[in-house]
């Protein structure tokens, strides 16, 4: 988990893919924290990504490793939404800017973790550099 978190935190932005009846959707994310051995993410409960994940919990994310590495990570799993005050606190501690973004809207701040996670570090030629575990 530490290598995966190191990659995601060093890149600041990674891309999350979801799907619904209209097809696939990709958007940038930047908030992830390791808490209780799980990768936790957050969003606003009125965003389409939350509705999509509640309809189809499958998620995939990708992030390029920072230079000079020539590799990237792909991670997939199923989103599990949980009203977990400690996980929310861990997320806010890791990314204090979220408190300002959600000021007056904390009741819409939701967190979720991934289960059934598969994560692979790949070289740009497509070969597997490392299977990452959570």
Image (tube, rainbow, N blue to C red):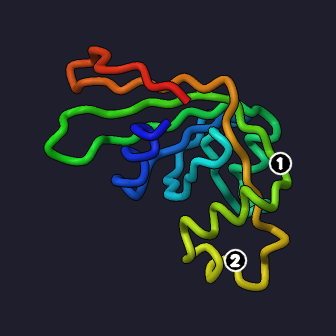
| Residue 37 appears left or right of 65 | right
In the rendered picture of this protein, how many numbered marks are placed on residues?
Answer: 2
In the image, what residue occupies the spot 83% across and 48% down? 82
Q: Quadrant of the C terminus?
A: top right
> Residue lying furthest front in this view?
36
In the image, what residue occupies the spot 60% across and 26% down? 117
Instruction: Choose top left, top right, bottom left or bottom right for residue 10.
Output: bottom left
In the image, what residue occupies the spot 64% across and 39% down? 38
**Tag of residue 52:** none
Q: For marks 1 and 2, give the one nearer the viewer.
A: 1
Q: Residues within 10 Å of mark 1 (few under 14, many from 20)?
A: few
Q: Distance of mark 1 from mark 2, alpha carbons?
A: 18 Å
> Residue lying furthest left in this view?
68
User: Which tag, 1 or 2, sits closer to the chain's start?
Assistant: 1
Can you say whether 69 is above or below 40 in the image? above
In the image, what residue occupies the spot 54% across and 43% down? 16
What residue does disc 1 label? 82
SS of the residue at dot 1? loop
Instruction: Choose top left, top right, bottom left or bottom right for residue 46.
Output: bottom right
Can you say whether 41 is above or below 95 in the image? above
Q: Where in the figure is residue 50, as x and y percent of width and height?
A: 75, 50
Q: Where in the figure is residue 13, as x and y percent of width and height?
A: 42, 55
| Residue 33 appears left or right of 102 | left
Q: Where in the figure is residue 107, as x and y percent of width and height?
A: 85, 71
SS of the residue at dot 2? loop
Can you say whether 35 is above or below 60 in the image? below
Q: Where in the figure is residue 106, as x and y percent of width and height?
A: 79, 74
Q: Residues within 10 Å of mark 2 (few under 14, many from 20)?
A: some
Confirm or deny contact between disc 1 and disc 2 (CB under 8 A). no
Foreground residue among 89 and 69: 89
| Residue 125 appears left or right of 106 | left
What residue does disc 2 label? 102
């Amino acid at each position: 988990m530490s290598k995966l978190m190191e990659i995601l935190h060093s890149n600041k932005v990674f891309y999350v893919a979801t799907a619904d009846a209209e097809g696939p959707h990709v958007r940038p994310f930047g908030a992830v924290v390791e808490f209780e051995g799980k990768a936790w993410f957050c969003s606003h409960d009125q965003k389409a990504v939350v509705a999509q994940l509640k309809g189809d919990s499958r998620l995939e994310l990708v992030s390029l490793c920072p230079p000079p590495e020539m590799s990237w990570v792909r991670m997939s799993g199923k989103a599990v939404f949980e009203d977990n005050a400690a996980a929310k606190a861990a997320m806010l501690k890791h990314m204090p800017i979220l408190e300002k973004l959600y000021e007056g809207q904390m009741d819409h701040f939701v967190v979720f973790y991934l289960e059934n996670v598969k994560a692979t570090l790949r070289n740009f030629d497509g070969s597997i550099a490392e299977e990452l575990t959570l």
